[in-house]
Image (tube, grey):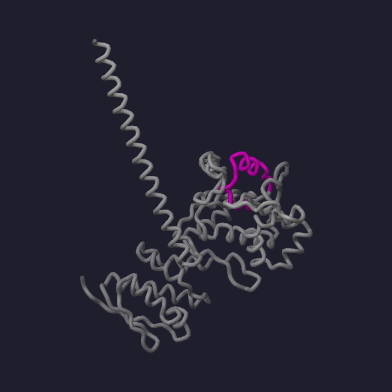
Amino acid sequence: MSIMETIIDIPTEHERNVFGHFDAYVKIIEKTLNVTIIARNGEIKVIGASEDVIKAKSVFVQLLELSKRGNTITEQNVNYALSLCFEDKESAIVEIDKDLICHTINGKPIKPKTIGQKSYVDMIRKKMIVFGVGPAGTGKTYLAMAMGITAFKNDEVSKIILTRPAIEAGEKLGFLPGDLQSKVDPYLRPLYDALYQIMGPDSFAKNTEKGLIEVAPLAYMRGRTLDNAFIILDEAQNTTPAQMKMFLTRIGFGSKVVITGDLTQKDLPTGTKSGLDVALKVLGKIEDIGFSFLTSQDVVRHPLVQKIVKAYDNYESKQQTYRGNDNHRVKGNKKIQYKSERIRGNKDGGK
């Protein structure tokens, strides 16, 4: 293994952004790629095995380009650039950054941040109905909301409809006080939060009063035909097959639909099939319907969330393996039991 070193120029105005607070990002790159990094006078020296040094240089070049494009570098950017460098795809991070969906009310740009998210956004642009399936923190609902608001502002649709099934996440809320809207608001709060952040409370309130933005439980969709609307069904894993069929058959002309869900977080009663599970099987071969499957690599929340998702994935896969082994053992025991009974029967018959 040959040892090499290389020098990378980092302009002073980008140092803090690329290096992180107290050189936190530099330490992550050092630890991940097993290289030594020395920063002095607007340049960094990277020392280590040739392959690792080349990867480290590529990561710094991509982070610097993101910084030059006006982005605030986050730990997620660094970790994702590192994960891509092992697949020789690190240049994709800058290409992804070029896709601007819209800005929040505070002027913050909303863009896809991973290859999976970019594919998801592109699919929403091309297909009439898109299923976005993946774990928490992958931006399924937020990106769909951004796409919906952009389509609304560009007069591509005349209204936005946001819906989700009113299912408790493991606890009972009891008899809630207030009118009907007050009773369902707790279930729809995540949708309101995203709308306020992207559109602003004033604009949201005005459009809601005009009936141009509607946030409602899934049960309210029954009996309606939804034309020329951008419709988002959130938490679709908590629908029943009947609810999912009802929702999909409401779609009218000029509408675009995004259905989001996490197959690992079902809150349905035990033994109830998920409408999302059934829909993925039934509709998988229809060309005009898109399916985007996001993974733990697409998690863009706090880095700890990505670790939690991975830990649960590993745990659940092990549990499935154990169940498979147990079933195999049970079947094997049944075969042995059946064989022994048949032998015993032959003996009895021969007496």
**Residue 312 figure quarter:** bottom left
Left or right: 160 with respect to 289?
A: right
Left or right: 223 with respect to 316?
A: right
Q: Nearer the viewer, residue 198 or 216?
A: 216
Q: Residue at x 63, y 69 (%)?
A: 104
Residue 61 appears in the figure: yes
**Residue 51 figure quarter:** bottom left
Left or right: 265 with respect to 128?
A: left
Point out the image quarter for the C terminus: top left
Point out the image quarter for the N terminus: bottom left
Q: Residue at x 31, y 27 (%)?
A: 337
Residue farthest to the left, as pictured: 1
Residue 85: percent from left, percent from top: 37, 66
* Residue bounds of the magenta highlight: 232-253
Residue 286 appears in the figure: no
Q: Residue at x 62, y 69 (%)?
A: 103
Left or right: 96 with respect to 322?
A: right
**Residue 37 figure quarter:** bottom left
Residue farthest to the right, as pictured: 210
Residue farthest to the top, as pictured: 351
Q: Is residue 25 magenta?
A: no
| Vertical relation: 24 (above or below) 204 | below
- The number of discs equals 0
Residue 170: percent from left, percent from top: 57, 51
Residue 95: percent from left, percent from top: 48, 66
Q: Residue at x 36, y 84 (%)?
A: 39
